[in-house]
Each structure stands twice: as structure tokens, then as C-alpha cells.
Amino acid sequence: MIIETKEDVVRLSGTLHKNQWMTIKAAANLLLVDHPEGIIVDCSGMQGISDDGAKTFLEAMRDIEAAHSRIIVANLPEQVMTKCRSIPGVRSQLPIADSVEAARASLRSARITHSMAHSADGAKRGALIFVPLLADIDLSYGVAIAQRMAGSSKTEIRLVYLLEVGRTLPLNAPMPEQEESAIKTLVQVRALANAQQGHVVENVERVREAVDGIVATAKAQNAGKIIIGLSKAPEEGEESEKVARLIQVLIKRAHCEVIIARKNQNE
């Protein structure tokens, strides 16, 4: 097995006869110093893999998950993929992309949202106001209410896009369409937020389910308020049921103040 590194890629070639994760991990950690948003393990040059070699990906999966690192495996040959499928949990938990380009695009989106989340200065702030960004609620109204409540204070308004990841996938799995949608939404909301003064920060949180993600993220970020903007009261229908459930769960489980703001119907 030959291990090469270049820019943000660790490239593997040859046959993986034994567990070599520690060697690959050492190379990956060096690259992560210059590429903290994440790196790629390119397996396009692999020609075969043994049962012991397959344990490389089992340990990789565990380490990546434990360290919350963004290490994406790309270009897994079919025979290697078949061997990985024989190990319980590996295929469903290892972040895999079809190509280096797809993996890099996923990492790029993470870099953009990471930059957004750390774009503000270090001024002392008041209690954080958390505005979840979901398809079924009125984003512009939620932002407007948050900025109205923050006023001229240094209260931080945190706009968080909840990217739902199915339980059959690892949380760091590349999701090109959803990641692109997240970036577009954050750009649009930032434009709305810039219409008024305020300390606004945006970021993406990968969650299994939006409702649980809001509760957990708000608590982790020590939010003082959660604001949900609605263009109208929830009625019948699947989308309205989601909103009604969201409100019910937040009121029951959120650790902080929950504000449900419905737009004046005469506006």
C-alpha cells in the first residue's frame, strides 16, 4: 500500500493487506493543520483489500466520529466497497463521496458556513437569540422579529440552518443538493439581516431531525430565546402538522424562552 499526500488529499494505491489506519491517520492529521475544514482520502488507486485491511475503514469511522473531523473517503472501487459492506456499520457510518470533486464541494460548503459562523467581532454580547432556518416557517419574519428584539444592543442573533441527515448516513456524509440549498438560504437571510443593524451570525448544523436539532443546538449555544416566525397560523395539511409539532416540542422541551410570532394578517 502506497500513501501519498497533496494539498487536501491523502491518496491510497495498491492493495490494503492489513489495518493501516494509524499510518493514514498520521498523514491526515498533518493535512488537517492546513485544511481544518476537512480532508479527502482518495481510494481510486486501490487494487484490492483483505479482511484485515477492511478494518482500516472500521477504525477510520470510529476515529472520525469521535473527533468530529471532516474526513471524507472518495472513489472507493467496487471490490473495496463490497468488502466494506461485509463489516457491520462501516458502509452506513463512513462518510463516502463518489469523487474527489464531490468531496471537495462538500468540504467547501463547510468552510463557507464555518467562516460565516466566526465572522463577527469579539464584542461582549447579551443573551443569544436563536432563529432556526426551516422550509416550513417564515424566515424573513423570524429575522425581523429577532432584530426588533435585539434593538441596538450587542445581543447576538444566531441564524441556524438545520440540515437533516438520514439515520442511514453518517452526519458528515456529503449531500451536494442539500448543502447548496443551505448556502443559498444563508446568503438570502444574510441579505435580509443586513437591511437592519445587528450582530448576526449564520451557520449550518447537521442534525438527524430538525425538531430535536433545534432543542439540542439552542441548549448547546446557550440561547436565551428561540424565535419562530409564521406567515399564518398552522392549519390542516402535512406542512402545517410539522409546524404544529415543532411548536409543541419546543414549548415542552426547550430550556429557554420560546417566541412564536405570527405576522399580522392585515400586512
Image (spheres, rainbow, N blue to C red):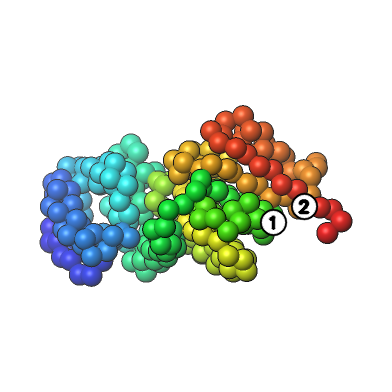
Q: What is the distance, in whole Å, between disc 2 and disc 1 at their CAs?
A: 7 Å
* Horizontal arrangement in the rendering, residue 181 relative to residue 170 (left or right): right
Is residue 209 visible from the viewing direction of this image?
no
Numbered label attached to residue 141: 1
Q: Residue at x 28, y 45 (%)?
A: 67
- Under tag 1, what secondary structure? helix
Of 181 and 223, the residue lying toward us: 223
Q: Disc 2 residue type?
A: Lys
Q: Badge 2 local density, few (<14 within 10 Å), some, or many (20+)?
A: some
Q: Badge 1 local density, few (<14 within 10 Å), some, or many (20+)?
A: some
* Horizontal arrangement in the rendering, residue 214 relative to residue 3 (left or right): right
Tell me where residue 152 appears, x and y as whole percent: 58, 59
Quarter of the picture holding the C terminus: bottom right
Q: Is residue 182 above or below residue 164?
A: below
Q: Is residue 145 above or below residue 256?
A: below
Whichever of labels 2 and 1 marks the residue nearer the N terminus, that label is 1
Q: Disc 1 residue type?
A: Tyr
Tell me where residue 123 appears, x and y as whole percent: 42, 57
Numbered label attached to residue 116: none
Q: Residue at x 67, y 38 (%)?
A: 247
Numbered label attached to residue 263: 2
Q: Is residue 234 above or below residue 139?
A: above
Q: CB under 8 Å between callouts 2 and 1?
A: yes
Quarter of the picture holding the N terminus: bottom left
Is residue 29 visible from the viewing direction of this image?
yes
- Under tag 2, what secondary structure? loop
